[in-house]
Image (spheres, rainbow, N blue to C red):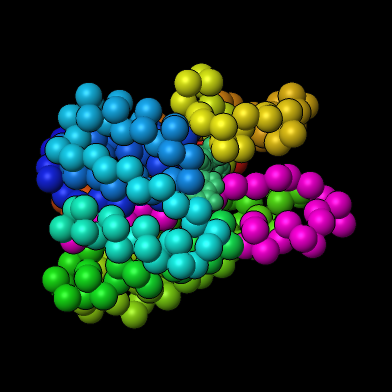
Amino acid sequence: MDLGLQDARVIVTGGASHIGRTIVLGFAAEGARIALVDKDEVQANRTAEEASAAGAALVTVVPADLTIREAAEQAMQASLEALDGVDVLINNVGSNRPAFFLDTPPESWDELIHLNLSSCMWCMRAVLPRMQAQGSGAIVATASTAAFGEPRQGVYGAAKAGVISIVRSVALEYGRDGIRANLVAPGLVLPEDDETMGEMSLWRDRDAVMNEDQITYVKRNTPLRRLSRPEDIANAVLFLASDRTARQLTGQMLTVSGGFAMR
Ligand SMILES: NC(=O)c1ccc[n+]([C@@H]2O[C@H](COP(=O)([O-])OP(=O)(O)OC[C@H]3O[C@@H](n4cnc5c(N)ncnc54)[C@H](O)[C@@H]3O)[C@@H](O)[C@H]2O)c1
């Protein structure tokens, strides 16, 4: 199906590696114009090359540390200039270091909150006025099943719960301006290949994230008995971003976890 995203102006945060990379390649295959915002310039350039080869009408890399408000705002301005506006914002950047709450050093809380939640707020705040002025726009944010409460995911899950809340508020407040805002909540998605992740990817040190017993636990408790692939998440993101497939959807969340979570 043609999603009607040819030449759509799309900003993807955290678009260099793994899930973000697959989202970028999904928009590229639709012929979109893409601003890829990521701190890892090396991997971002690699993904941008793939996106050009996959059919993107334009790909521009915007290097930025999205844990810093000024940097996030500047990155959005640079993206708006490069794309000459915006039709779609994908708030995908995020990361985690699973640990029990008492083992999560308070010094790391700010970074987790800024990377997962504040970045989403800063980026939306920077692009919403442009979307309001043109009377259209679609926002999709990557949440997580951790937002529903999972062990070893406390601070990260709290930040993602915040993402769900702020995106729904935006949907309520700016729907009248023609802006849709939705969420995708992935369950566990392992990278399939080292080439798909840069040095900053959480999955570079996979054992620090999940051991084999924990992965087996997730599979056993997933009705479909398989983990999600990055393409499963990207398909849901593109579906929600397209006005053809999701014209009447706003404030909604698609949980993509093979049934591991059902809300
Ligand atoms: N993979 C999973 O199992 C899973 C599950 C649920 C939700 N998610 C969410 O999906 C999104 C993508 O996750 P992923 O697994 O692809 O992560 P990843 O670590 O592989 O990729 C994250 C990307 O963000 C970039 N990045 C990291 N810190 C940054 C910073 N300070 N500023 C700018 N860019 C930065 C990295 O370079 C990388 O390209 C995240 O929001 C994550 O929380 C992932």
x, y percentage for residue 154?
73, 57
In percent of the image, x 79 and y 62: which residue is there?
106
Quarter-wise, where is residue 236 in the image? top left
Q: Where is the N terminus found, in terms of image quarters? A: top left
Q: Nearer the viewer, residue 120 or 261?
A: 120
Name which residue lies at 44% across and 52% down: 64
Task: Answer with the quarter of the image where residue 27 lies.
Answer: top left
Question: Which residue is at the far right?
Answer: 102
- Would residue 177 be seen by someone viewing this image from the given angle? yes
Residue toward you, 177 or 131: 131
Q: Going by the image, does 144 lie left or right of 106? A: left
Counting from the top left corner in percent of width and height, residue 134 is at 14, 71
Q: Is residue 191 left or right of residue 11?
A: right
Residue 182 position within the rendered picture, expressed as x and y whole percent measured from the top left: 37, 60
Q: Nearer the viewer, residue 202 or 171?
A: 202
Q: Is residue 95 magenta?
A: yes
Q: Position of residue 13 (x, y in %)?
A: 41, 50
Q: Which residues are magenta?
A: 85-113
**138 horizontally vs 113: left or right:** left
Quadrant in the rendering for residue 211: top right
Q: Is residue 260 above or below residue 150?
A: above
Magenta stretch containing residue 179, yes or no? no
